[in-house]
Image (spheres, rainbow, N blue to C red):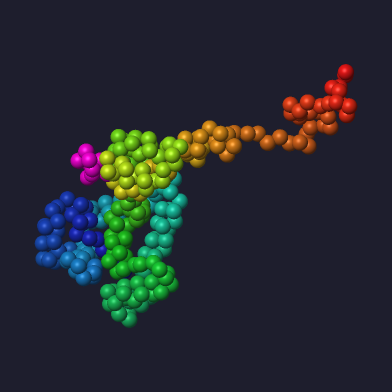
Amino acid sequence: MNQPYLTVEQVARLVGAPIRTVRHNAAAGKYGEVRYEEVGAGRGGRMLLIPLSGLPAKVQADYFRTMATQQETPADLSATPEDARRELGERLETLAAWQAYRQAHAAEAGAHKLDKQFVQMWRESHPGRSLSVATLHRWEKARREQGESSLIDRRGTARAGETSVPDDLWAKYCALYLHQNKRSHMQCYRTVRDMASLEGRLHEVPSESAFRRRAAREFSREMLIFLREGPSAWYLKAAPYVDRDHTSVPPGGVFVMDHFQMTSPAGQRPGE
């Protein structure tokens, strides 16, 4: 692809016109020779792409200025988890390999057939993982319009740290679970669920995994031992202690004794 091609949405933002107007102008040939890309067999089927060279000079300058700014100020991923950054890198590598495959075999087949071939090759080299032509186009569209950081999968992160367990139901769960009767997690969950059902609140009870996740966040090992097994178990299993380096103690420097009362062989106490 020698020149950039933009989506209808991108052109509409650049020229400040409704999407319907952009489509009408493209159909009338006002942007030059447009092209279409297959985006799967779903609704629409094809995506209209408009050549940047067909837009007014000022619009082209604005586009290149925006792209340069995006390249100069990469997204700050310092707060992004390592596994998410790794996934972003893998997706970018996949997109780069896809585009390279297209360019290398452009004379052999159309874009849609090449995309299918690439996806098949990718699946064979990544057993157990999935990829589709539609996914490739979705990633490329997001990267082109919103930048590389848009490829980060943020599902489930918007409410990170929050819980779906109502606080009053959680209090009932804690009263049951943090007890020396040592009820199991499922026993406590079912009891809370039954109590909520009697109150007409069964619809407010999330899955047992929601209770389990909150317990994993809020209950430390030391807390569970103290409350479920008692202070004696906590003292033996979890109480803080300091290891002594016995090599630093000179001979006779420390004497450790118990309450045993020593007697003489004749039954007399020492000193009698």
Q: Residue at x 55, y 37 (%)?
A: 233
**Residue 167 vs residue 111, the one in the foreground:** 167
The x, y position of residue 271, in whole percent, is 88, 19
User: Looking at the rendering, which quadrant does residue 41 occupy?
Assistant: bottom left
Q: Residue at x 33, y 36 (%)?
A: 172
Q: Is residue 148 visible?
A: yes
The outermost residue toward the front is 266
The x, y position of residue 76, in whole percent, is 40, 46
Q: Residue at x 23, y 43 (%)?
A: 197
Quadrant occupied by the N terminus: bottom left
**Which span of residues is magenta-colored?**
196-205
The x, y position of residue 228, in whole percent, is 47, 38
Q: Is residue 35 visible?
A: no
Q: Is residue 168 above or below residue 29?
A: above
Please, what is the dominant secondary structure of the magenta stretch?
A: helix
The outermost residue toward the top is 272
The stretch drawn in magenta includes residue 172 = no
**Residue 264 vs residue 192, the one in the foreground:** 264
Q: Residue at x 41, y 63 (%)?
A: 93
User: Looking at the rendering, which quadrant does residue 103 occupy?
Assistant: bottom left
